[in-house]
Amino acid sequence: MKDDTALVHLGREPEKHQGIVNPPVYHASTVLFPTVEDYLNRSKGDRKYRGIRYGTNGTPTTFALADTVADLEGGGGAIVVSSGLSAITLAILAFVKQGDNILVCDSVYGPTRAFCDTVLTRYGIETTYYDPLIGNDISLLFKENTRLVFTESPGSMTFEVQDIPAISSTAHNRDLMVMMDNTWGTPLYFKPFDHGVDVSIQAGTKYMSGGSDLVIGIITAKTESLFRNIKDTTMAFGEIAAPDDCYLTLRGLRSMGARLRQQQAAAMKIAEWLQKRPEVKRVLYPPLSDDPGHALWKRDFTGACSLFGLVLNTDSLAAVSRMLDGYRYFRIGSSWGGFESLAIPANPAITRTTVPWTEKGYLVRIHIGLEDPDDLIQDLVDGFSRLNKAPQ
Ligand SMILES: Cc1ncc(COP(=O)(O)O)c(C=O)c1O
């Protein structure tokens, strides 16, 4: 089954629901058992991980979404949790213990870094941040107590593409696990398990749900045994996504392929237009042929989402604010992957610890929504004229 067909047909069994196209939403805390024996056996064998036995362990609605994402990514099992960030933190917590070291890319999503630097540090787990362009040389960072490598490619603020197959095979030579925040690639454009990843994370908050109206995370494991390890941890934390959010995410998934194709085409058109503007120093978008990550992106990805960066020729925040504050369609706000265009100022220099961010100009992160790209270009034209008139 091709991905577009899978998006439509996975996670639905109309014949079990009187022909109704979408699976119903099950709200549950208590689940009843007919006999004492059934109750006492409720966690035996596979029922522990896939049984319907209490709300926090999963309902038919949460399993419908989890199984759909697991199939799309090509993994052995998936777990839905309350946000993309909790998917990241719980996946890491499932495999580390006091005294361990983990390797995390220096380009990682800010709150992932904050989790490592606060919670993990407090529990005696050390994080080493690596250059996202490190490739096979990641082996130079392996220590006796290194447990796993956490990747995010491209970085969602600075867009470096990592050599995931090289990092994975080097890590596997030392029996280390590789995790990836695959939100930018989506399950459609990057197949993590074909490239050596063991655990893949999706912030379903973004393109999967697509409506900018919920937060949800999905952890997909390559194998059944990794899936069980992670589920043991998410169940221990009492972590599960809300059934209504699972329903909305499944509904969003049905149109994700079409939305992504439109958003990708618009992003490419706008990124190429931006490259020709005198106000723009560099556009950070791997599908562009002169992007430093283009060759790896072309080798490993089958498409791109509509999130990219823009380094301006000015580093005046006041001038950049004048440009951003006046946009008509691009709005200022966190997150991405919804139907609306966004533009936010970013300053990677303040978080980097291993590879300093040395770009002189101001970085703006752009998300292209489903608006007509010509309207968005006009909005950008007007913004540049505000930028040019602002005191630098
Ligand atoms: C790359 C990346 N991963 C994970 C997340 C976290 O997702 P959530 O907002 O659902 O916690 C985000 C959110 O912006 C993100 O950009």
Image: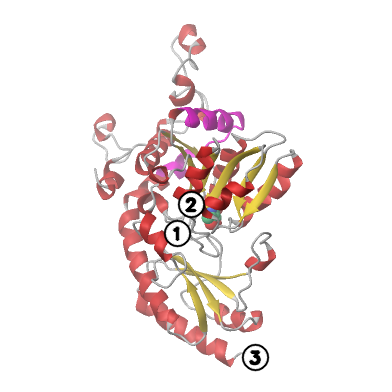
Do the residues bearing badges 2 and 1 touch, measured as CB atoms within 8 Å?
A: yes
At 44% from the left and 23% from the top, the residue drawn is 51
- 384 relative position to 372: left or right: right
Label 1, ligand 1: CB separation under 8 Å: no
Magenta span: 225-247
Q: Eyeballing the image, is 380 above or below 293? A: below
Image quarter of residue 350: bottom right
Label 3, ligand 1: CB separation under 8 Å: no
Q: Whole-percent x and y of residue 345?
A: 59, 71
At 63% from the left and 81% from the top, the residue drawn is 315
Mark 3 is surrounded, within 10 Å at the Cα level, by few (under 14), some (14 to 19) or many (20 or more) other residues, namely few
Mark 1 is surrounded, within 10 Å at the Cα level, by few (under 14), some (14 to 19) or many (20 or more) other residues, namely many
Q: Quadrant of the N terminus?
A: top left
Q: Label 1 belongs to which residue?
A: 337
Residue 163 seen in the current view:
yes
Q: Whole-percent x and y of residue 7?
A: 30, 46
- 150 relative position to 200: left or right: right
Which disc, if any, is residue 205?
2
Question: What amino acid type should be assigned to the residue bearing mark 2?
Answer: Thr
Q: Nearer the viewer, residue 171 or 253?
A: 171
N-term mark: 3 or 1: 1
Label 2, ligand 1: CB separation under 8 Å: yes
